């Protein structure tokens, strides 16, 4: 994921975060970062070719306050085949970026991002999502107890045979006890 127009030096850059928090701290030596401040058509083409070059063993995912999966905001497109796409960020997603202190106010948050498509995400052999905090509790409830729907994009995770979603007490606080029992989809 990468916000359109955001340089790698910006504190809210996912490229910057991945480099600092994962790549430089581990033995990861082959990676493809999405340059949202580059030629977008070229980025989509090159990234699509790279991801098609080998099976994906695991996808690490985020679920947003609005239930977005990666940056696939509601209503997410569950059918698009392209591996990466330019998505419009809804106001809730953009406000989340402000709430997480990546931006001083919503006027500075890009309105578009490059995101892996939902279909591409589901191609990974394993999916792992970490969803912390009370501010995500409503989205967790909608995605894992509500109707599977493009309006709750992360609800699609329930269709994957090997998806693991880690919740903390706060993000799970609105779930019914039956949802969290052994053998549940969460």
Image (cartoon, grey):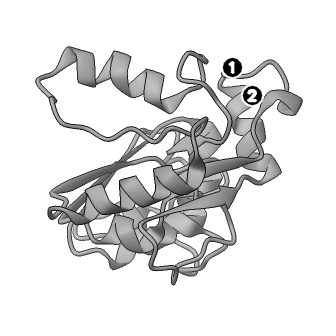
Q: Is residue 99 left or right of residue 28?
A: right
Q: Quadrant of residue 94?
A: top right
Q: Nearer the viewer, residue 95 or 115?
A: 115
* 124 vs 94: above or below: below
Which residue bears the numbered disc 2? 98
Q: Which residue sits furthest left? A: 27
Q: Residues within 10 Å of mark 1 (few under 14, many from 20)?
A: few
Q: Position of residue 153 (x, y in %)?
A: 56, 68
Q: Is residue 144 visible?
A: no
Q: Is residue 22 left or right of residue 115?
A: left
Q: Position of residue 63 (x, y in %)?
A: 51, 51
* 101 vs 117: above or below: above
Q: Secondary structure at mark 2?
A: helix
Q: Position of residue 103 (x, y in %)?
A: 74, 22
Q: Nearer the viewer, residue 53 or 118?
A: 53
Q: Quadrant of residue 76?
A: bottom right
Q: Nearer the viewer, residue 35 or 77?
A: 35
Q: Position of residue 142 (x, y in %)?
A: 60, 66
Which residue bears the numbered disc 1? 101
Quadrant for the C terminus in the image = bottom left
Q: Is residue 101 left or right of residue 140?
A: right
Confirm or deny contact between disc 1 and disc 2 (CB under 8 A). Answer: yes
């Amino acid at each position: 994921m990468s916000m359109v127009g955001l340089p790698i030096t910006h504190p809210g850059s996912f490229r910057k975060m991945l480099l600092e928090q994962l790549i430089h701290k581990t033995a990861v030596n082959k990676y493809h970062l999405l340059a949202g401040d580059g030629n977008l058509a070229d980025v989509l083409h090159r990234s699509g070719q790279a991801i098609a070059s080998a099976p994906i063993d695991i996808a690490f995912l985020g679920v947003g306050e609005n239930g977005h999966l990666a940056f696939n905001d509601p209503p997410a497109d569950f059918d698009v085949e392209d591996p990466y796409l330019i998505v419009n960020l809804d106001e809730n997603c953009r406000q989340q970026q402000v709430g997480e202190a990546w931006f001083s106010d919503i006027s500075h948050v890009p309105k578009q991002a490059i995101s892996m498509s939902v279909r591409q995400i589901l191609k990974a052999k394993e999916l792992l999502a970490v969803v912390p905090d009370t501010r995500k509790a409503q989205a967790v409830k909608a995605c894992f107890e509500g109707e599977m729907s493009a309006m709750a994009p992360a609800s699609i995770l329930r269709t994957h045979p090997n998806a693991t979603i880690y919740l903390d007490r706060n993000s799970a606080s609105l779930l019914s006890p039956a949802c969290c029992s052994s053998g549940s989809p969460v």
